[in-house]
Image (cartoon, helix red, strand yellow):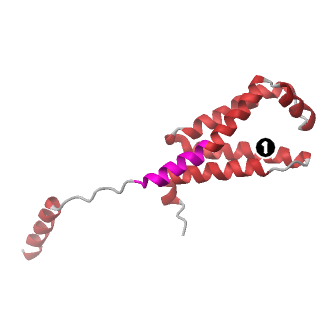
Amino acid sequence: MQNADYAQNVAASAETAPSRPTPSPNKSILWTGRVLSALPALMMVLSAAMKISHAPQFVTMWTGKFGYAESQLLPIGLLELTCVAVFVFPRTAVLGAILLTGYLGGAVATHVRVGDMFLIPVVLGVLAWTGVYLRDERLRALVPLR
């Protein structure tokens, strides 16, 4: 009998206890993540625009230095824009970061193959992941920095 009374008292106190508000993300962390995410997104949109527009200097570099066919400019530019579009939407940002990582891995491989400096695609990938890490609490909970 005593256990039943205790259980009722605990249940009643739980119902009347004030609920704790869920912690809101720190606004400065969220905005830092947004800015860090915007940098690679903007750089990649610019890169895709050069591919899609077939800018003469870019075409010369694309075909001569990198050794790709000019006919590949449009599909690769559209692929790049698609990856960025998936990345900028909060619901699909993690998937977008994965896609950007794959795309930028190909860019690194291209630069290594021709003996170019490959730091820019690596930095863009790091910025993309840092930005999405700061924007998404679920990702921070999954991969905690200690």
Residue positioned 50% across, 42% down in the render: 90
Residue identified by numbered label 1: 107
Residue at the (55%, 65%) spot, across then down: 145
Pick whichever, 9 or 101, lies toward us. 101
Residue 84's x, y, as percent?
Answer: 63, 37
Q: Residue at x 63, y 40 (%)?
A: 41
In x, y percent, where is residue 120? 76, 48
The kind of residue tagged 1 is Ala
Tell me the quadrant of the picture where the N terminus can be found: bottom left
For numbered disc 1, what is the local secondary structure? helix
Residue that sits furthest to the bottom in the current view: 2
Let me know if residue 34 is in the magenta part.
Answer: yes
The answer to whether residue 124 is left or right of residue 116 is: left
Q: Work out whether residue 104 or residue 38 is closer to the camera in this orientation and state it.
A: 38
Apparent side of residue 76 relative to residue 56 in the rendered image (left or right) = left
Q: Main secondary structure of the magenta part?
A: helix
One can see residue 64 in this view: yes
Q: Residues within 10 Å of mark 1 (few under 14, many from 20)?
A: some
